[in-house]
Image (tube, rainbow, N blue to C red):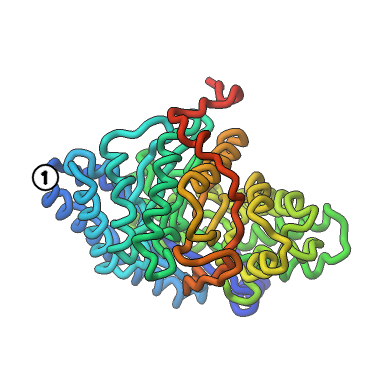
Amino acid sequence: MINFNEVMETNAMIEQENLDVRTITLGISLLDCIDSNLEELNRKIYEKITKTAEKLVSTGVEIEKDFGIPVVNKRISITPAALVGSAACKTKEDFVEIAKTLDRAAKTVGVNFIGGFSALVSKGMTKADRLLIESIPEALAVTERVCSSINVGSTKTGINMDAVKLLGEIVKDTAEHTKEKDSLGCAKLVIFCNAPDDNPFMAGAFHGVTEADAIINVGVSGPGVVKKALEKARGKDFETLCETIKKTAFKITRVGQLVAKEASKRMNIPFGIVDLSLAPTPAVGDSVAEILQEIGLEYPGAPGTTAALALLNDQVKKGGVMASSYVGGLSGAFIPVSEDQGMIDAVQAGCLTLEKLEAMTCVCSVGLDMIAIPGATSAATISGIIADEMAIGMINQKTTAVRLIPVIGKKVGDIVEFGGLLGYAPVMPVNEFSCEAFVNRGGRIPVPIHSFKN
């Protein structure tokens, strides 16, 4: 039972320290919608989503009202669309029609994002996989709520470099298709290694094929709470620091567990996982960078940053798993640039570079996230950056991802406004030496030796 003191403590976290349930994400399997007729497929998809999710938004609003816990977003994830559309889609335009259907369904039920316009191609691409990938630039340009993710590598399969090369071109094309909105389409496209099946956070959420017909996953975030707790541990040793983070993460996860269980009961849909991720927003006091500064860094990017982030990520996970039997998704610390004011400040101060961010992704929850780069950056360079990040995930047996935004018409130092939770970002420099011959080799990078565990 939660006692009175815990209730008061939680209220303070919500009112003063930006604690919130970032998202209730309803995962929906669309495998039973598969049909060889495209029109029939779209009808089934629309009906399945709107029927299953009809009470999602109202349930989130009711929980927020009844418990006083902010539930910021209500979202949907679906079975990777490349699988769902494989029988009906003969052209990339057919997949664009599916994206439009997903967007229409999301609008009908009132969610702000729907994830799962996705393909899993870590070992190879089917014809449907390739068609979906080729449809992404147009699909993200003509929809508002659809998010796309492609898994191109894993510790068990290696890295599909043919897909990596293609996606460098797709990222550029997506930027061109949405250049009137500062290439915003790229903010809805994530490229993964070791993508989890139960991630509730956008833009990378999809409903894995191992999941039930429908599932409730909750993502809870509280970087401001952790930062506030660490203020009381200034000058203390690492043991005290770790205990403070761990205990705070425990309390935050308990809030997520409560909301997840309540949403599951009210919607009569099974509870999946709680994802405890310190996901920042542009709001003052809601920054992972500020946590790193509280640990002892002048700015993120200073010597010691990777060690501090490793410590933070590990203690967050340890606290989370003690608070819920079902912790999953990405769980840990996110380090997006545009969504974290402290990260933006570090870039503008000249402390944080793309290369240092890459080093930090070895120990964070995701990867190179929401980073604006010059619009003139070549597709091959983008593919090379993707390959580097996939290699980190593959070798270290962890999830890594890339969400780069080559902003057409912008150069290093320009500021790009994305708005809302996506914030704004300074355009960061990219190493301009060529990797084209490497990217053009084709084929796969094989699995590491330590992957052979049966």
Tell me which residue sits at (50%, 41%) in the image: 193
Query: Which quadrant of the rendered structure holds the N terminus?
Result: bottom right
Tell me which residue sits at (53%, 54%) in the image: 275
Looking at the image, residue 449 lies above or below residue 342: above
Tell me which residue sits at (45%, 51%) in the image: 190
Q: Is residue 103 visible?
A: yes
Amino acid tagged 1: Asn
The percent coordinates of residue 289 (x first, y second) are 68, 64
Report the front residue among 293 and 44: 293
Report the front residue among 159 and 255: 159
Instruction: Give the quadrant of residue 282.
Output: bottom right
Mark 1 crowd level (few <14, some 14–19, many ≥20, 10 Å Cα): few
Is 154 left, or right, of 244 in this rendering? left
Tell me which residue sits at (68%, 70%) in the image: 345
The percent coordinates of residue 385 (x first, y second) are 55, 45
Looking at the image, residue 253 lies above or below residue 151: below
The percent coordinates of residue 174 (x first, y second) are 37, 56
